Image (cartoon, grey):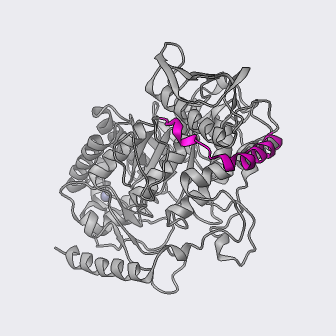
Amino acid sequence: MGLRPRQKLKTHHESALRRVTPEGGKRNILILNNNQHHIPHYMKALLLAAAFLSSLCWAGTNPYNIIPEPVKVTTASGTTKNLKILNEQKVSGLGNEGYSMKLTPGGVELRYTTPNGKAMAMATLFQLQDQLADSPEGLPCGSIQDAPDFGWRGMMVDVGRYHYPMKELYNFVDAMHYYKYNVLHLHLTEDQGWRLPVPGYDKLRTIGSVRPSAPEGQNNSLLANEGMYSKKELQDLVAYCKARGIQVLPEVEMPGHNMALAASYPEFCCNTKRAQLWTHGGVSSKLICPQKAGTKKFLKDTYDTLQQIFSFGYVHIGGDECPMGDWKKCADCQAARAKKGQGDDVEAQMSDFTKSLGAMLAKNKKKPILWYDINKSYYHKGETVMSWLPGEFPRCIDKTKEQGIDLIVTPQYKYYLARTQMKFPADDVRARPGGGPILLKDCYNFDPRNGRDKNDVKHIKGINLCMWAEWIPSGELLMYMTYPRAMAVSESAWGSHKERPSLEDFEKKMETHKKRFQKRFGYTLERTVENKPYRESSITQEEIDRINANYKKGQQDAGK
Ligand SMILES: [Zn+2]
């Protein structure tokens, strides 16, 4: 799975709860500290003017400038300059992520049913805290009652194609939490890199995680990159996310998109000839062979590793874009099919394979998620799929319902945020990947239920944004591509699509978030053709040389 232009395809933290950024700034510290908002005298006149301007900007009736809009807001008399938590209480009936909040002159009273509800309340409090910093006159007293419409609001980060440093992932998670996303989907394996450490398989690190520079003149090339996450790093990330109401969904793609694995362990493939990890995008034809003894053991060891790191009840097993030629030709695959009377029906073999992966996960009390190709026959009742094929989205709703499959909506021309967010001059390299931009309004106006009644499409669990990394090789570019569009999607996936604010009101609200975003996350929300970072500027020649040297070392290990 990945992004393909013009084709149908497609800190260091001190603890899980507290973190200080390397720059020493404060970020999303879960325990609010009111002193942060002490405002020097000389700033007050300036801030009053700014507050007046921002009140002109936001035309909604809700005085709290929150994205996504809370379900219900009531205001009371008086104002508050104090957002300290006065008291909090677990109560029943507010749902998995619901909360209520009362703002009084003396502070804030919180109610929630689960820790996830508290995490969502904290995201609202952070936003109110930022609004208060711009409002020296204080915020109106009042109350907020809130709960999401969709239980799944995910973001996929393509760490397979680009190994983002942990520091960048933490920053990304902070922003996810601020805008109430609740699933971080890590696409851990790809043709261009393998990032999951599986004990006993060291070549995944020395070979599978090192991508050299592409040969000169190669089309669709990626930049050099290397890196493998450690078990401890991933466990810490999972804990950090959990404290923010975010689950981490790991993805180990099978049987296609596996050139990094094939380069490390060719014996797991149908065709055991040694392959090279890819330095370019596309869909590879080399497939992992489910019939090899080594593969069976490797899959078990991989799933055991996932079990030790990830606590979420789902694992993404991939399952898309695997041209079946290798399975057709492979003697081991042929023998397995013959035993079952399947002849050359490779889709039946694929159905058996994904079913066996699901059974392995079930032993660990986990369920599989797959990419969904509406034209394929290998899905099973009870599975969950992500629909991405362009033009197939409305049809997927009924088809998955018929099949008894849960659906997560990921349409490539609405939610593949790796695509540009504005129109570029055609000859500007920053316009890539092409295939037409996805504008903020496209994201905002897209209804994940396609106008259907909620009760009629209960199998739609929610939405997932995808930031494929062929053209996003830095944390800076990742934030640049994801926002502000993810704010628009958050608005349309949290509340009722019909009752969301007008696009104009949303954009006014967004304006007031620009300064906060810069302050909290260190990146601008301004989007112009000129300020898009060049992909190539994200790596130095020194780094390229180091990676290429490591690649050579890995190749010496390859035959051992
Ligand atoms: Zn095979």
Task: Tell me what residue is drawn at x 45 percent, y 22 percent.
Answer: 114
Residue 33 lies in the magenta-colored region = yes
Q: Quadrant of residue 79?
A: top right
What secondary structure do most residues of the magenta stretch adopt?
Answer: helix
Looking at this rendering, what residue extends furthest in the front direction?
41
Q: Quadrant of ligand 1?
A: bottom left
Q: Is residue 435 above or below residue 252?
A: below
Task: Tell me what residue is drawn at x 39 percent, y 82 percent.
Answer: 542
Looking at this rendering, what residue extends furthest in the top direction?
92
Q: Quadrant of residue 160?
A: bottom left
In the image, residue 465 lies at what x, y percent?
57, 48
Q: Quadrant of the C terminus?
A: bottom left
In the image, residue 419 lies at what x, y percent?
64, 60
Q: Is residue 336 above or below residue 96?
A: below
Judged left or right of residue 119, residue 364 is left
Residue 251 lies in the magenta-colored region = no
Q: Nearer the viewer, residue 58 or 309?
A: 58
Q: Is residue 247 above or below residue 110?
A: below
Judged left or right of residue 482, residue 119 is left
In magenta, the rendered stretch is 32-58
Q: Quadrant of residue 5?
A: bottom right
In the image, residue 516 lies at what x, y percent?
63, 49
Q: Nearer the viewer, residue 298 or 115?
A: 115
Judged left or right of residue 509, residue 271 is left
Q: Nearer the viewer, residue 216 or 549?
A: 549
Residue 395 visible in rendering: no
In the image, residue 553 lies at what x, y percent?
24, 79
Task: Tell me what residue is drawn at x 56 percent, y 38 percent.
Answer: 126
Task: Tell me what residue is drawn at x 28 percent, y 81 percent.
Answer: 552
